[in-house]
Amino acid sequence: MGAAPRRDFFSGAEVKVKFESLADFLAMGGHGLYVWLAYGIALVILVLNVLQPLRMTRQFFTEQSRRLRREKKLS
């Protein structure tokens, strides 16, 4: 008595499992290193694309605040 076949939630079609275990999934048929490095690099780039503008904005406002304090002190 085997396990019931997996079914797609929306269509009800049978889903075939491509990997037998988590280790097989992570190995990606021998291409795991390349695949996961590519995902990692893409994730780093996406995170930097979010954080860099935030950092630059904070730096801009800090510099403007210093400039205004300096001008107020001189006047």
Image: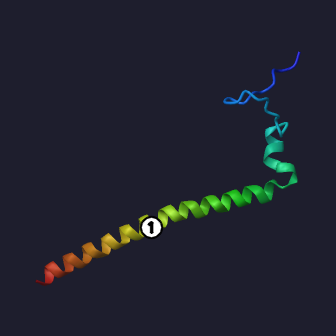
Could you say where residue 41 lies in the image, as x and y percent from the top left? 66, 62
What residue is drawn where x is 87% and y is 53%? 30
Quadrant in which residue 53 is drawn? bottom left
Could you say where residue 4 lies in the image, as x and y percent from the top left? 81, 21
Quarter of the image where the N terminus is located: top right
Residue 46 in the image: above or below residue 24: below
Could you say where residue 8 lies in the image, as x and y percent from the top left? 72, 30
What residue is drawn where x is 14% and y is 84%? 74
Task: Say which residue label 1 marks.
Answer: 53
Q: Work out which residue is located at the far bottom of the displayed protein and give it.
A: 74
Residue 20 in the image: above or below residue 57: above
Total numbered labels? 1
Q: What element does badge 1 sit on? A: helix
Residue 63 is left or right of residue 56, and the answer is: left
Q: Amino acid at mark 1?
A: Pro
Quadrant in which residue 40 is drawn? bottom right
Q: Work out which residue is located at the far left of the displayed protein and give it.
A: 75
Quadrant in which residue 60 is drawn? bottom left
Instruction: Count neighbours of disc 1 (C-alpha within 10 A) and say few if under 14, some if 14 to 19, many if 20 or more.
Output: few
Q: Nearer the viewer, residue 13 or 48?
A: 13
Could you say where residue 9 lies in the image, as x and y percent from the top left? 68, 29
Residue 6 in the image: above or below residue 42: above
